[in-house]
Amino acid sequence: MSTLAQGFALEALRVEPLAGFVSGPGGRERLDPKVMDVFVHMAEHAGQVVLREELLARLWPNAVVTDDALTRCFYELRRGLAHAGGDEHYRTLLETVPKRGYRLNAIVKPVGIQAAPQAPSEPLRRRGTLLAASIAALALAVIATGVFLWRMPDKLEATAGSPPPHSIAVLPFVDMSAAKDQGYFSDGVTEEILNHLSQSESLRVISRTSSFALRNEQLDVPKIAERLGVDYVLEGSVRKSGGRVRITAQLIDASTNSHVWSQTFDRSVDDLFAVQDEIAISVAAAVGSTTGGGRSARHVPASVEAYECFLQGEFHYHRRSPGDVERAVDYYLQAIALDPRYARAWAALAGAYSLLIGEMDETKTQALRILQGEAARKAVEIDPDLAVAHARLAQYFFHVARFQDGKAHLRTAVALDPDDPLVLGFSATDAIWKDDYAKALVLWRRISAKDPLSATSRGNLGYMLMLNDRLDEALAESQWALELNPDGGPSLHTNIARILIQLGRYDEASAGIRQLPEGNDRDYLIALLHRAPGWRQEADAALKRLAAAPRDVPATIQLADVYADRGQQDAAFDLLATEYRKIERDRAARPRALWYFQDEMRLSPYLKALHADPRWAQVATIPD
């Protein structure tokens, strides 16, 4: 056992590895044993870059796990340090080194740990903090505690005097088949139950992305519930053999870690749909809710074979490894061949075509765009009560610049299922197009509450907070998104740098900018540093390079951003008007190009200063 495994200190924190505690000015925090193992290993290599591969081999020597397990450990560790230290500074001691690993930037000293006085219990300590805080301070406390944020939207939306809705996470059911080759099937059973539960108006259901993110982690139910911010956890297993299927499900109350309901179903595969419905209805009833299944028609496929093909498509669509979207299309088409009136398969096919189109040059996508529209129309025709079908048709109409038709189908989708994540995302985009950034923020809070472990959801929430000038919260959300996905690409690093610049934290912003490769993104951020002491000359030089570089739509928006931020509104409008005229001339061949250009304009925090100018309407309005 190493010396540090006995106990160590860094800054104002004392660490007791054997007992599992970190103590500091903010209180005493218990860390999960695996998280503490990570902390001790980082402390033993303080100041050094510890490779992700090294950590995985050290901590999980006899198991195959994904990088997600390690990412979650660092997420929990940073949160624990911030709580114990009583300051967000402690979160930043653990640095993510993109594409390599992590580094602990602190001086670590071995110490003999004395028995520490018992700190107040966690619920009591947090409750006291919240009671003493003003409304403004509460917003900061929400960011600091993390879990409370995930519950906040439902609490805010509950009617006066009524209790907040119950919340539940449906964990991926375990594949218990002999060959372990039915993972797609058990995942599909899980998602079907999840979707059915989501129909309840009095039950908040965590989305698939976040529930499935914990698949490889060895956590007990209370820890899972804390991480996802839920009251209940549903877990189970599926064993499929020939024409029989056995599903075992159990509902656990996270507050007591006790079973509320459990049952085993041993049925014919042909009864699968009825079993899934029965589980969802029983679970909802066990927590005093209903599934609301009568609110919209549910189209059941004509055969289990069609359903299995659909599940294979969903498996590949969600996995997104190279070639997976093409495989998803193939499976959806097989499902449709077996059941031509399978509306969900048609809607899923439209979504897969949209993804494929997004990866191609728009001039090469005409054939796929036609197929996308046909699939979405077919889904609506077969099941006009299927919200996702209307959402996919709205998406198609937006892409071909038929905006009135798109808005009509989006309204229908919202009326059918306002809490569907896809519908919520489209509704948030619609709010942005109406310049209603406050509404867009509310919608993204709801999306994030359903999907708390999604880097995409948290990154988008951070962006909405930035557009609403809530910069401290925006920074925290964006940094969390980067923790959840350290390889999230340049956009997260760019957003974090922009927020730091707007906050006037120039040293931190410039340190991150220096790590970016040379090119437009780096020059854009340097040009925005023109107010930073000692940076004006370098910022002016970066602006000249940006203005001289070849420009696509993102580069045009970046240059307009810099002009607007420097008060050069005429130059910004001249640039935007030139791009508008160029796209308008070519609109027949590229109908989505103008929508994309104007969407990027509306998502710019710097161009908001131009909205009140009469010239804004000339470049921000799409002709009918």
Image (spheres, rainbow, N blue to C red):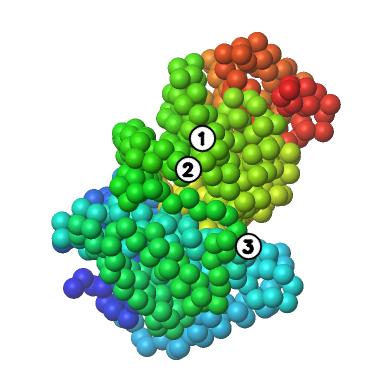
Q: Earlier in the sequence, mark 1 or mark 3?
A: 3
Query: Which numbered disc covers residue 153?
Result: 3
Circle 2 residues within 10 Å: few <14, some 14–19, many ≥20: many
Q: Secondary structure at mark 3?
A: helix
Query: Residue placed at 29% from the left, 59% from the top?
Result: 269
Disc 1 designates what residue?
A: 378
- Circles 1 and 2: CB atoms closer than 8 Å: yes
Q: Amino acid at mark 2?
A: Ala
Q: Is residue 367 left or right of residue 103?
A: right
Q: Quadrant of the C terminus?
A: top right
Circle 3 residues within 10 Å: few <14, some 14–19, many ≥20: many
Instruction: Give x and y (percent) for residue 526.
Output: 56, 31
Alpha-carbon span between mark 1 and mark 3? 35 Å
Alpha-carbon span between mark 1 and mark 2? 7 Å
Q: Secondary structure at mark 1?
A: helix
- Which image quadrant is residue 551 in? top right
Q: Quadrant of the N terminus?
A: bottom left
Query: Which numbered disc covers residue 343?
Result: 2
**Of the pair 589 and 603, the residue shown nearer to us:** 589
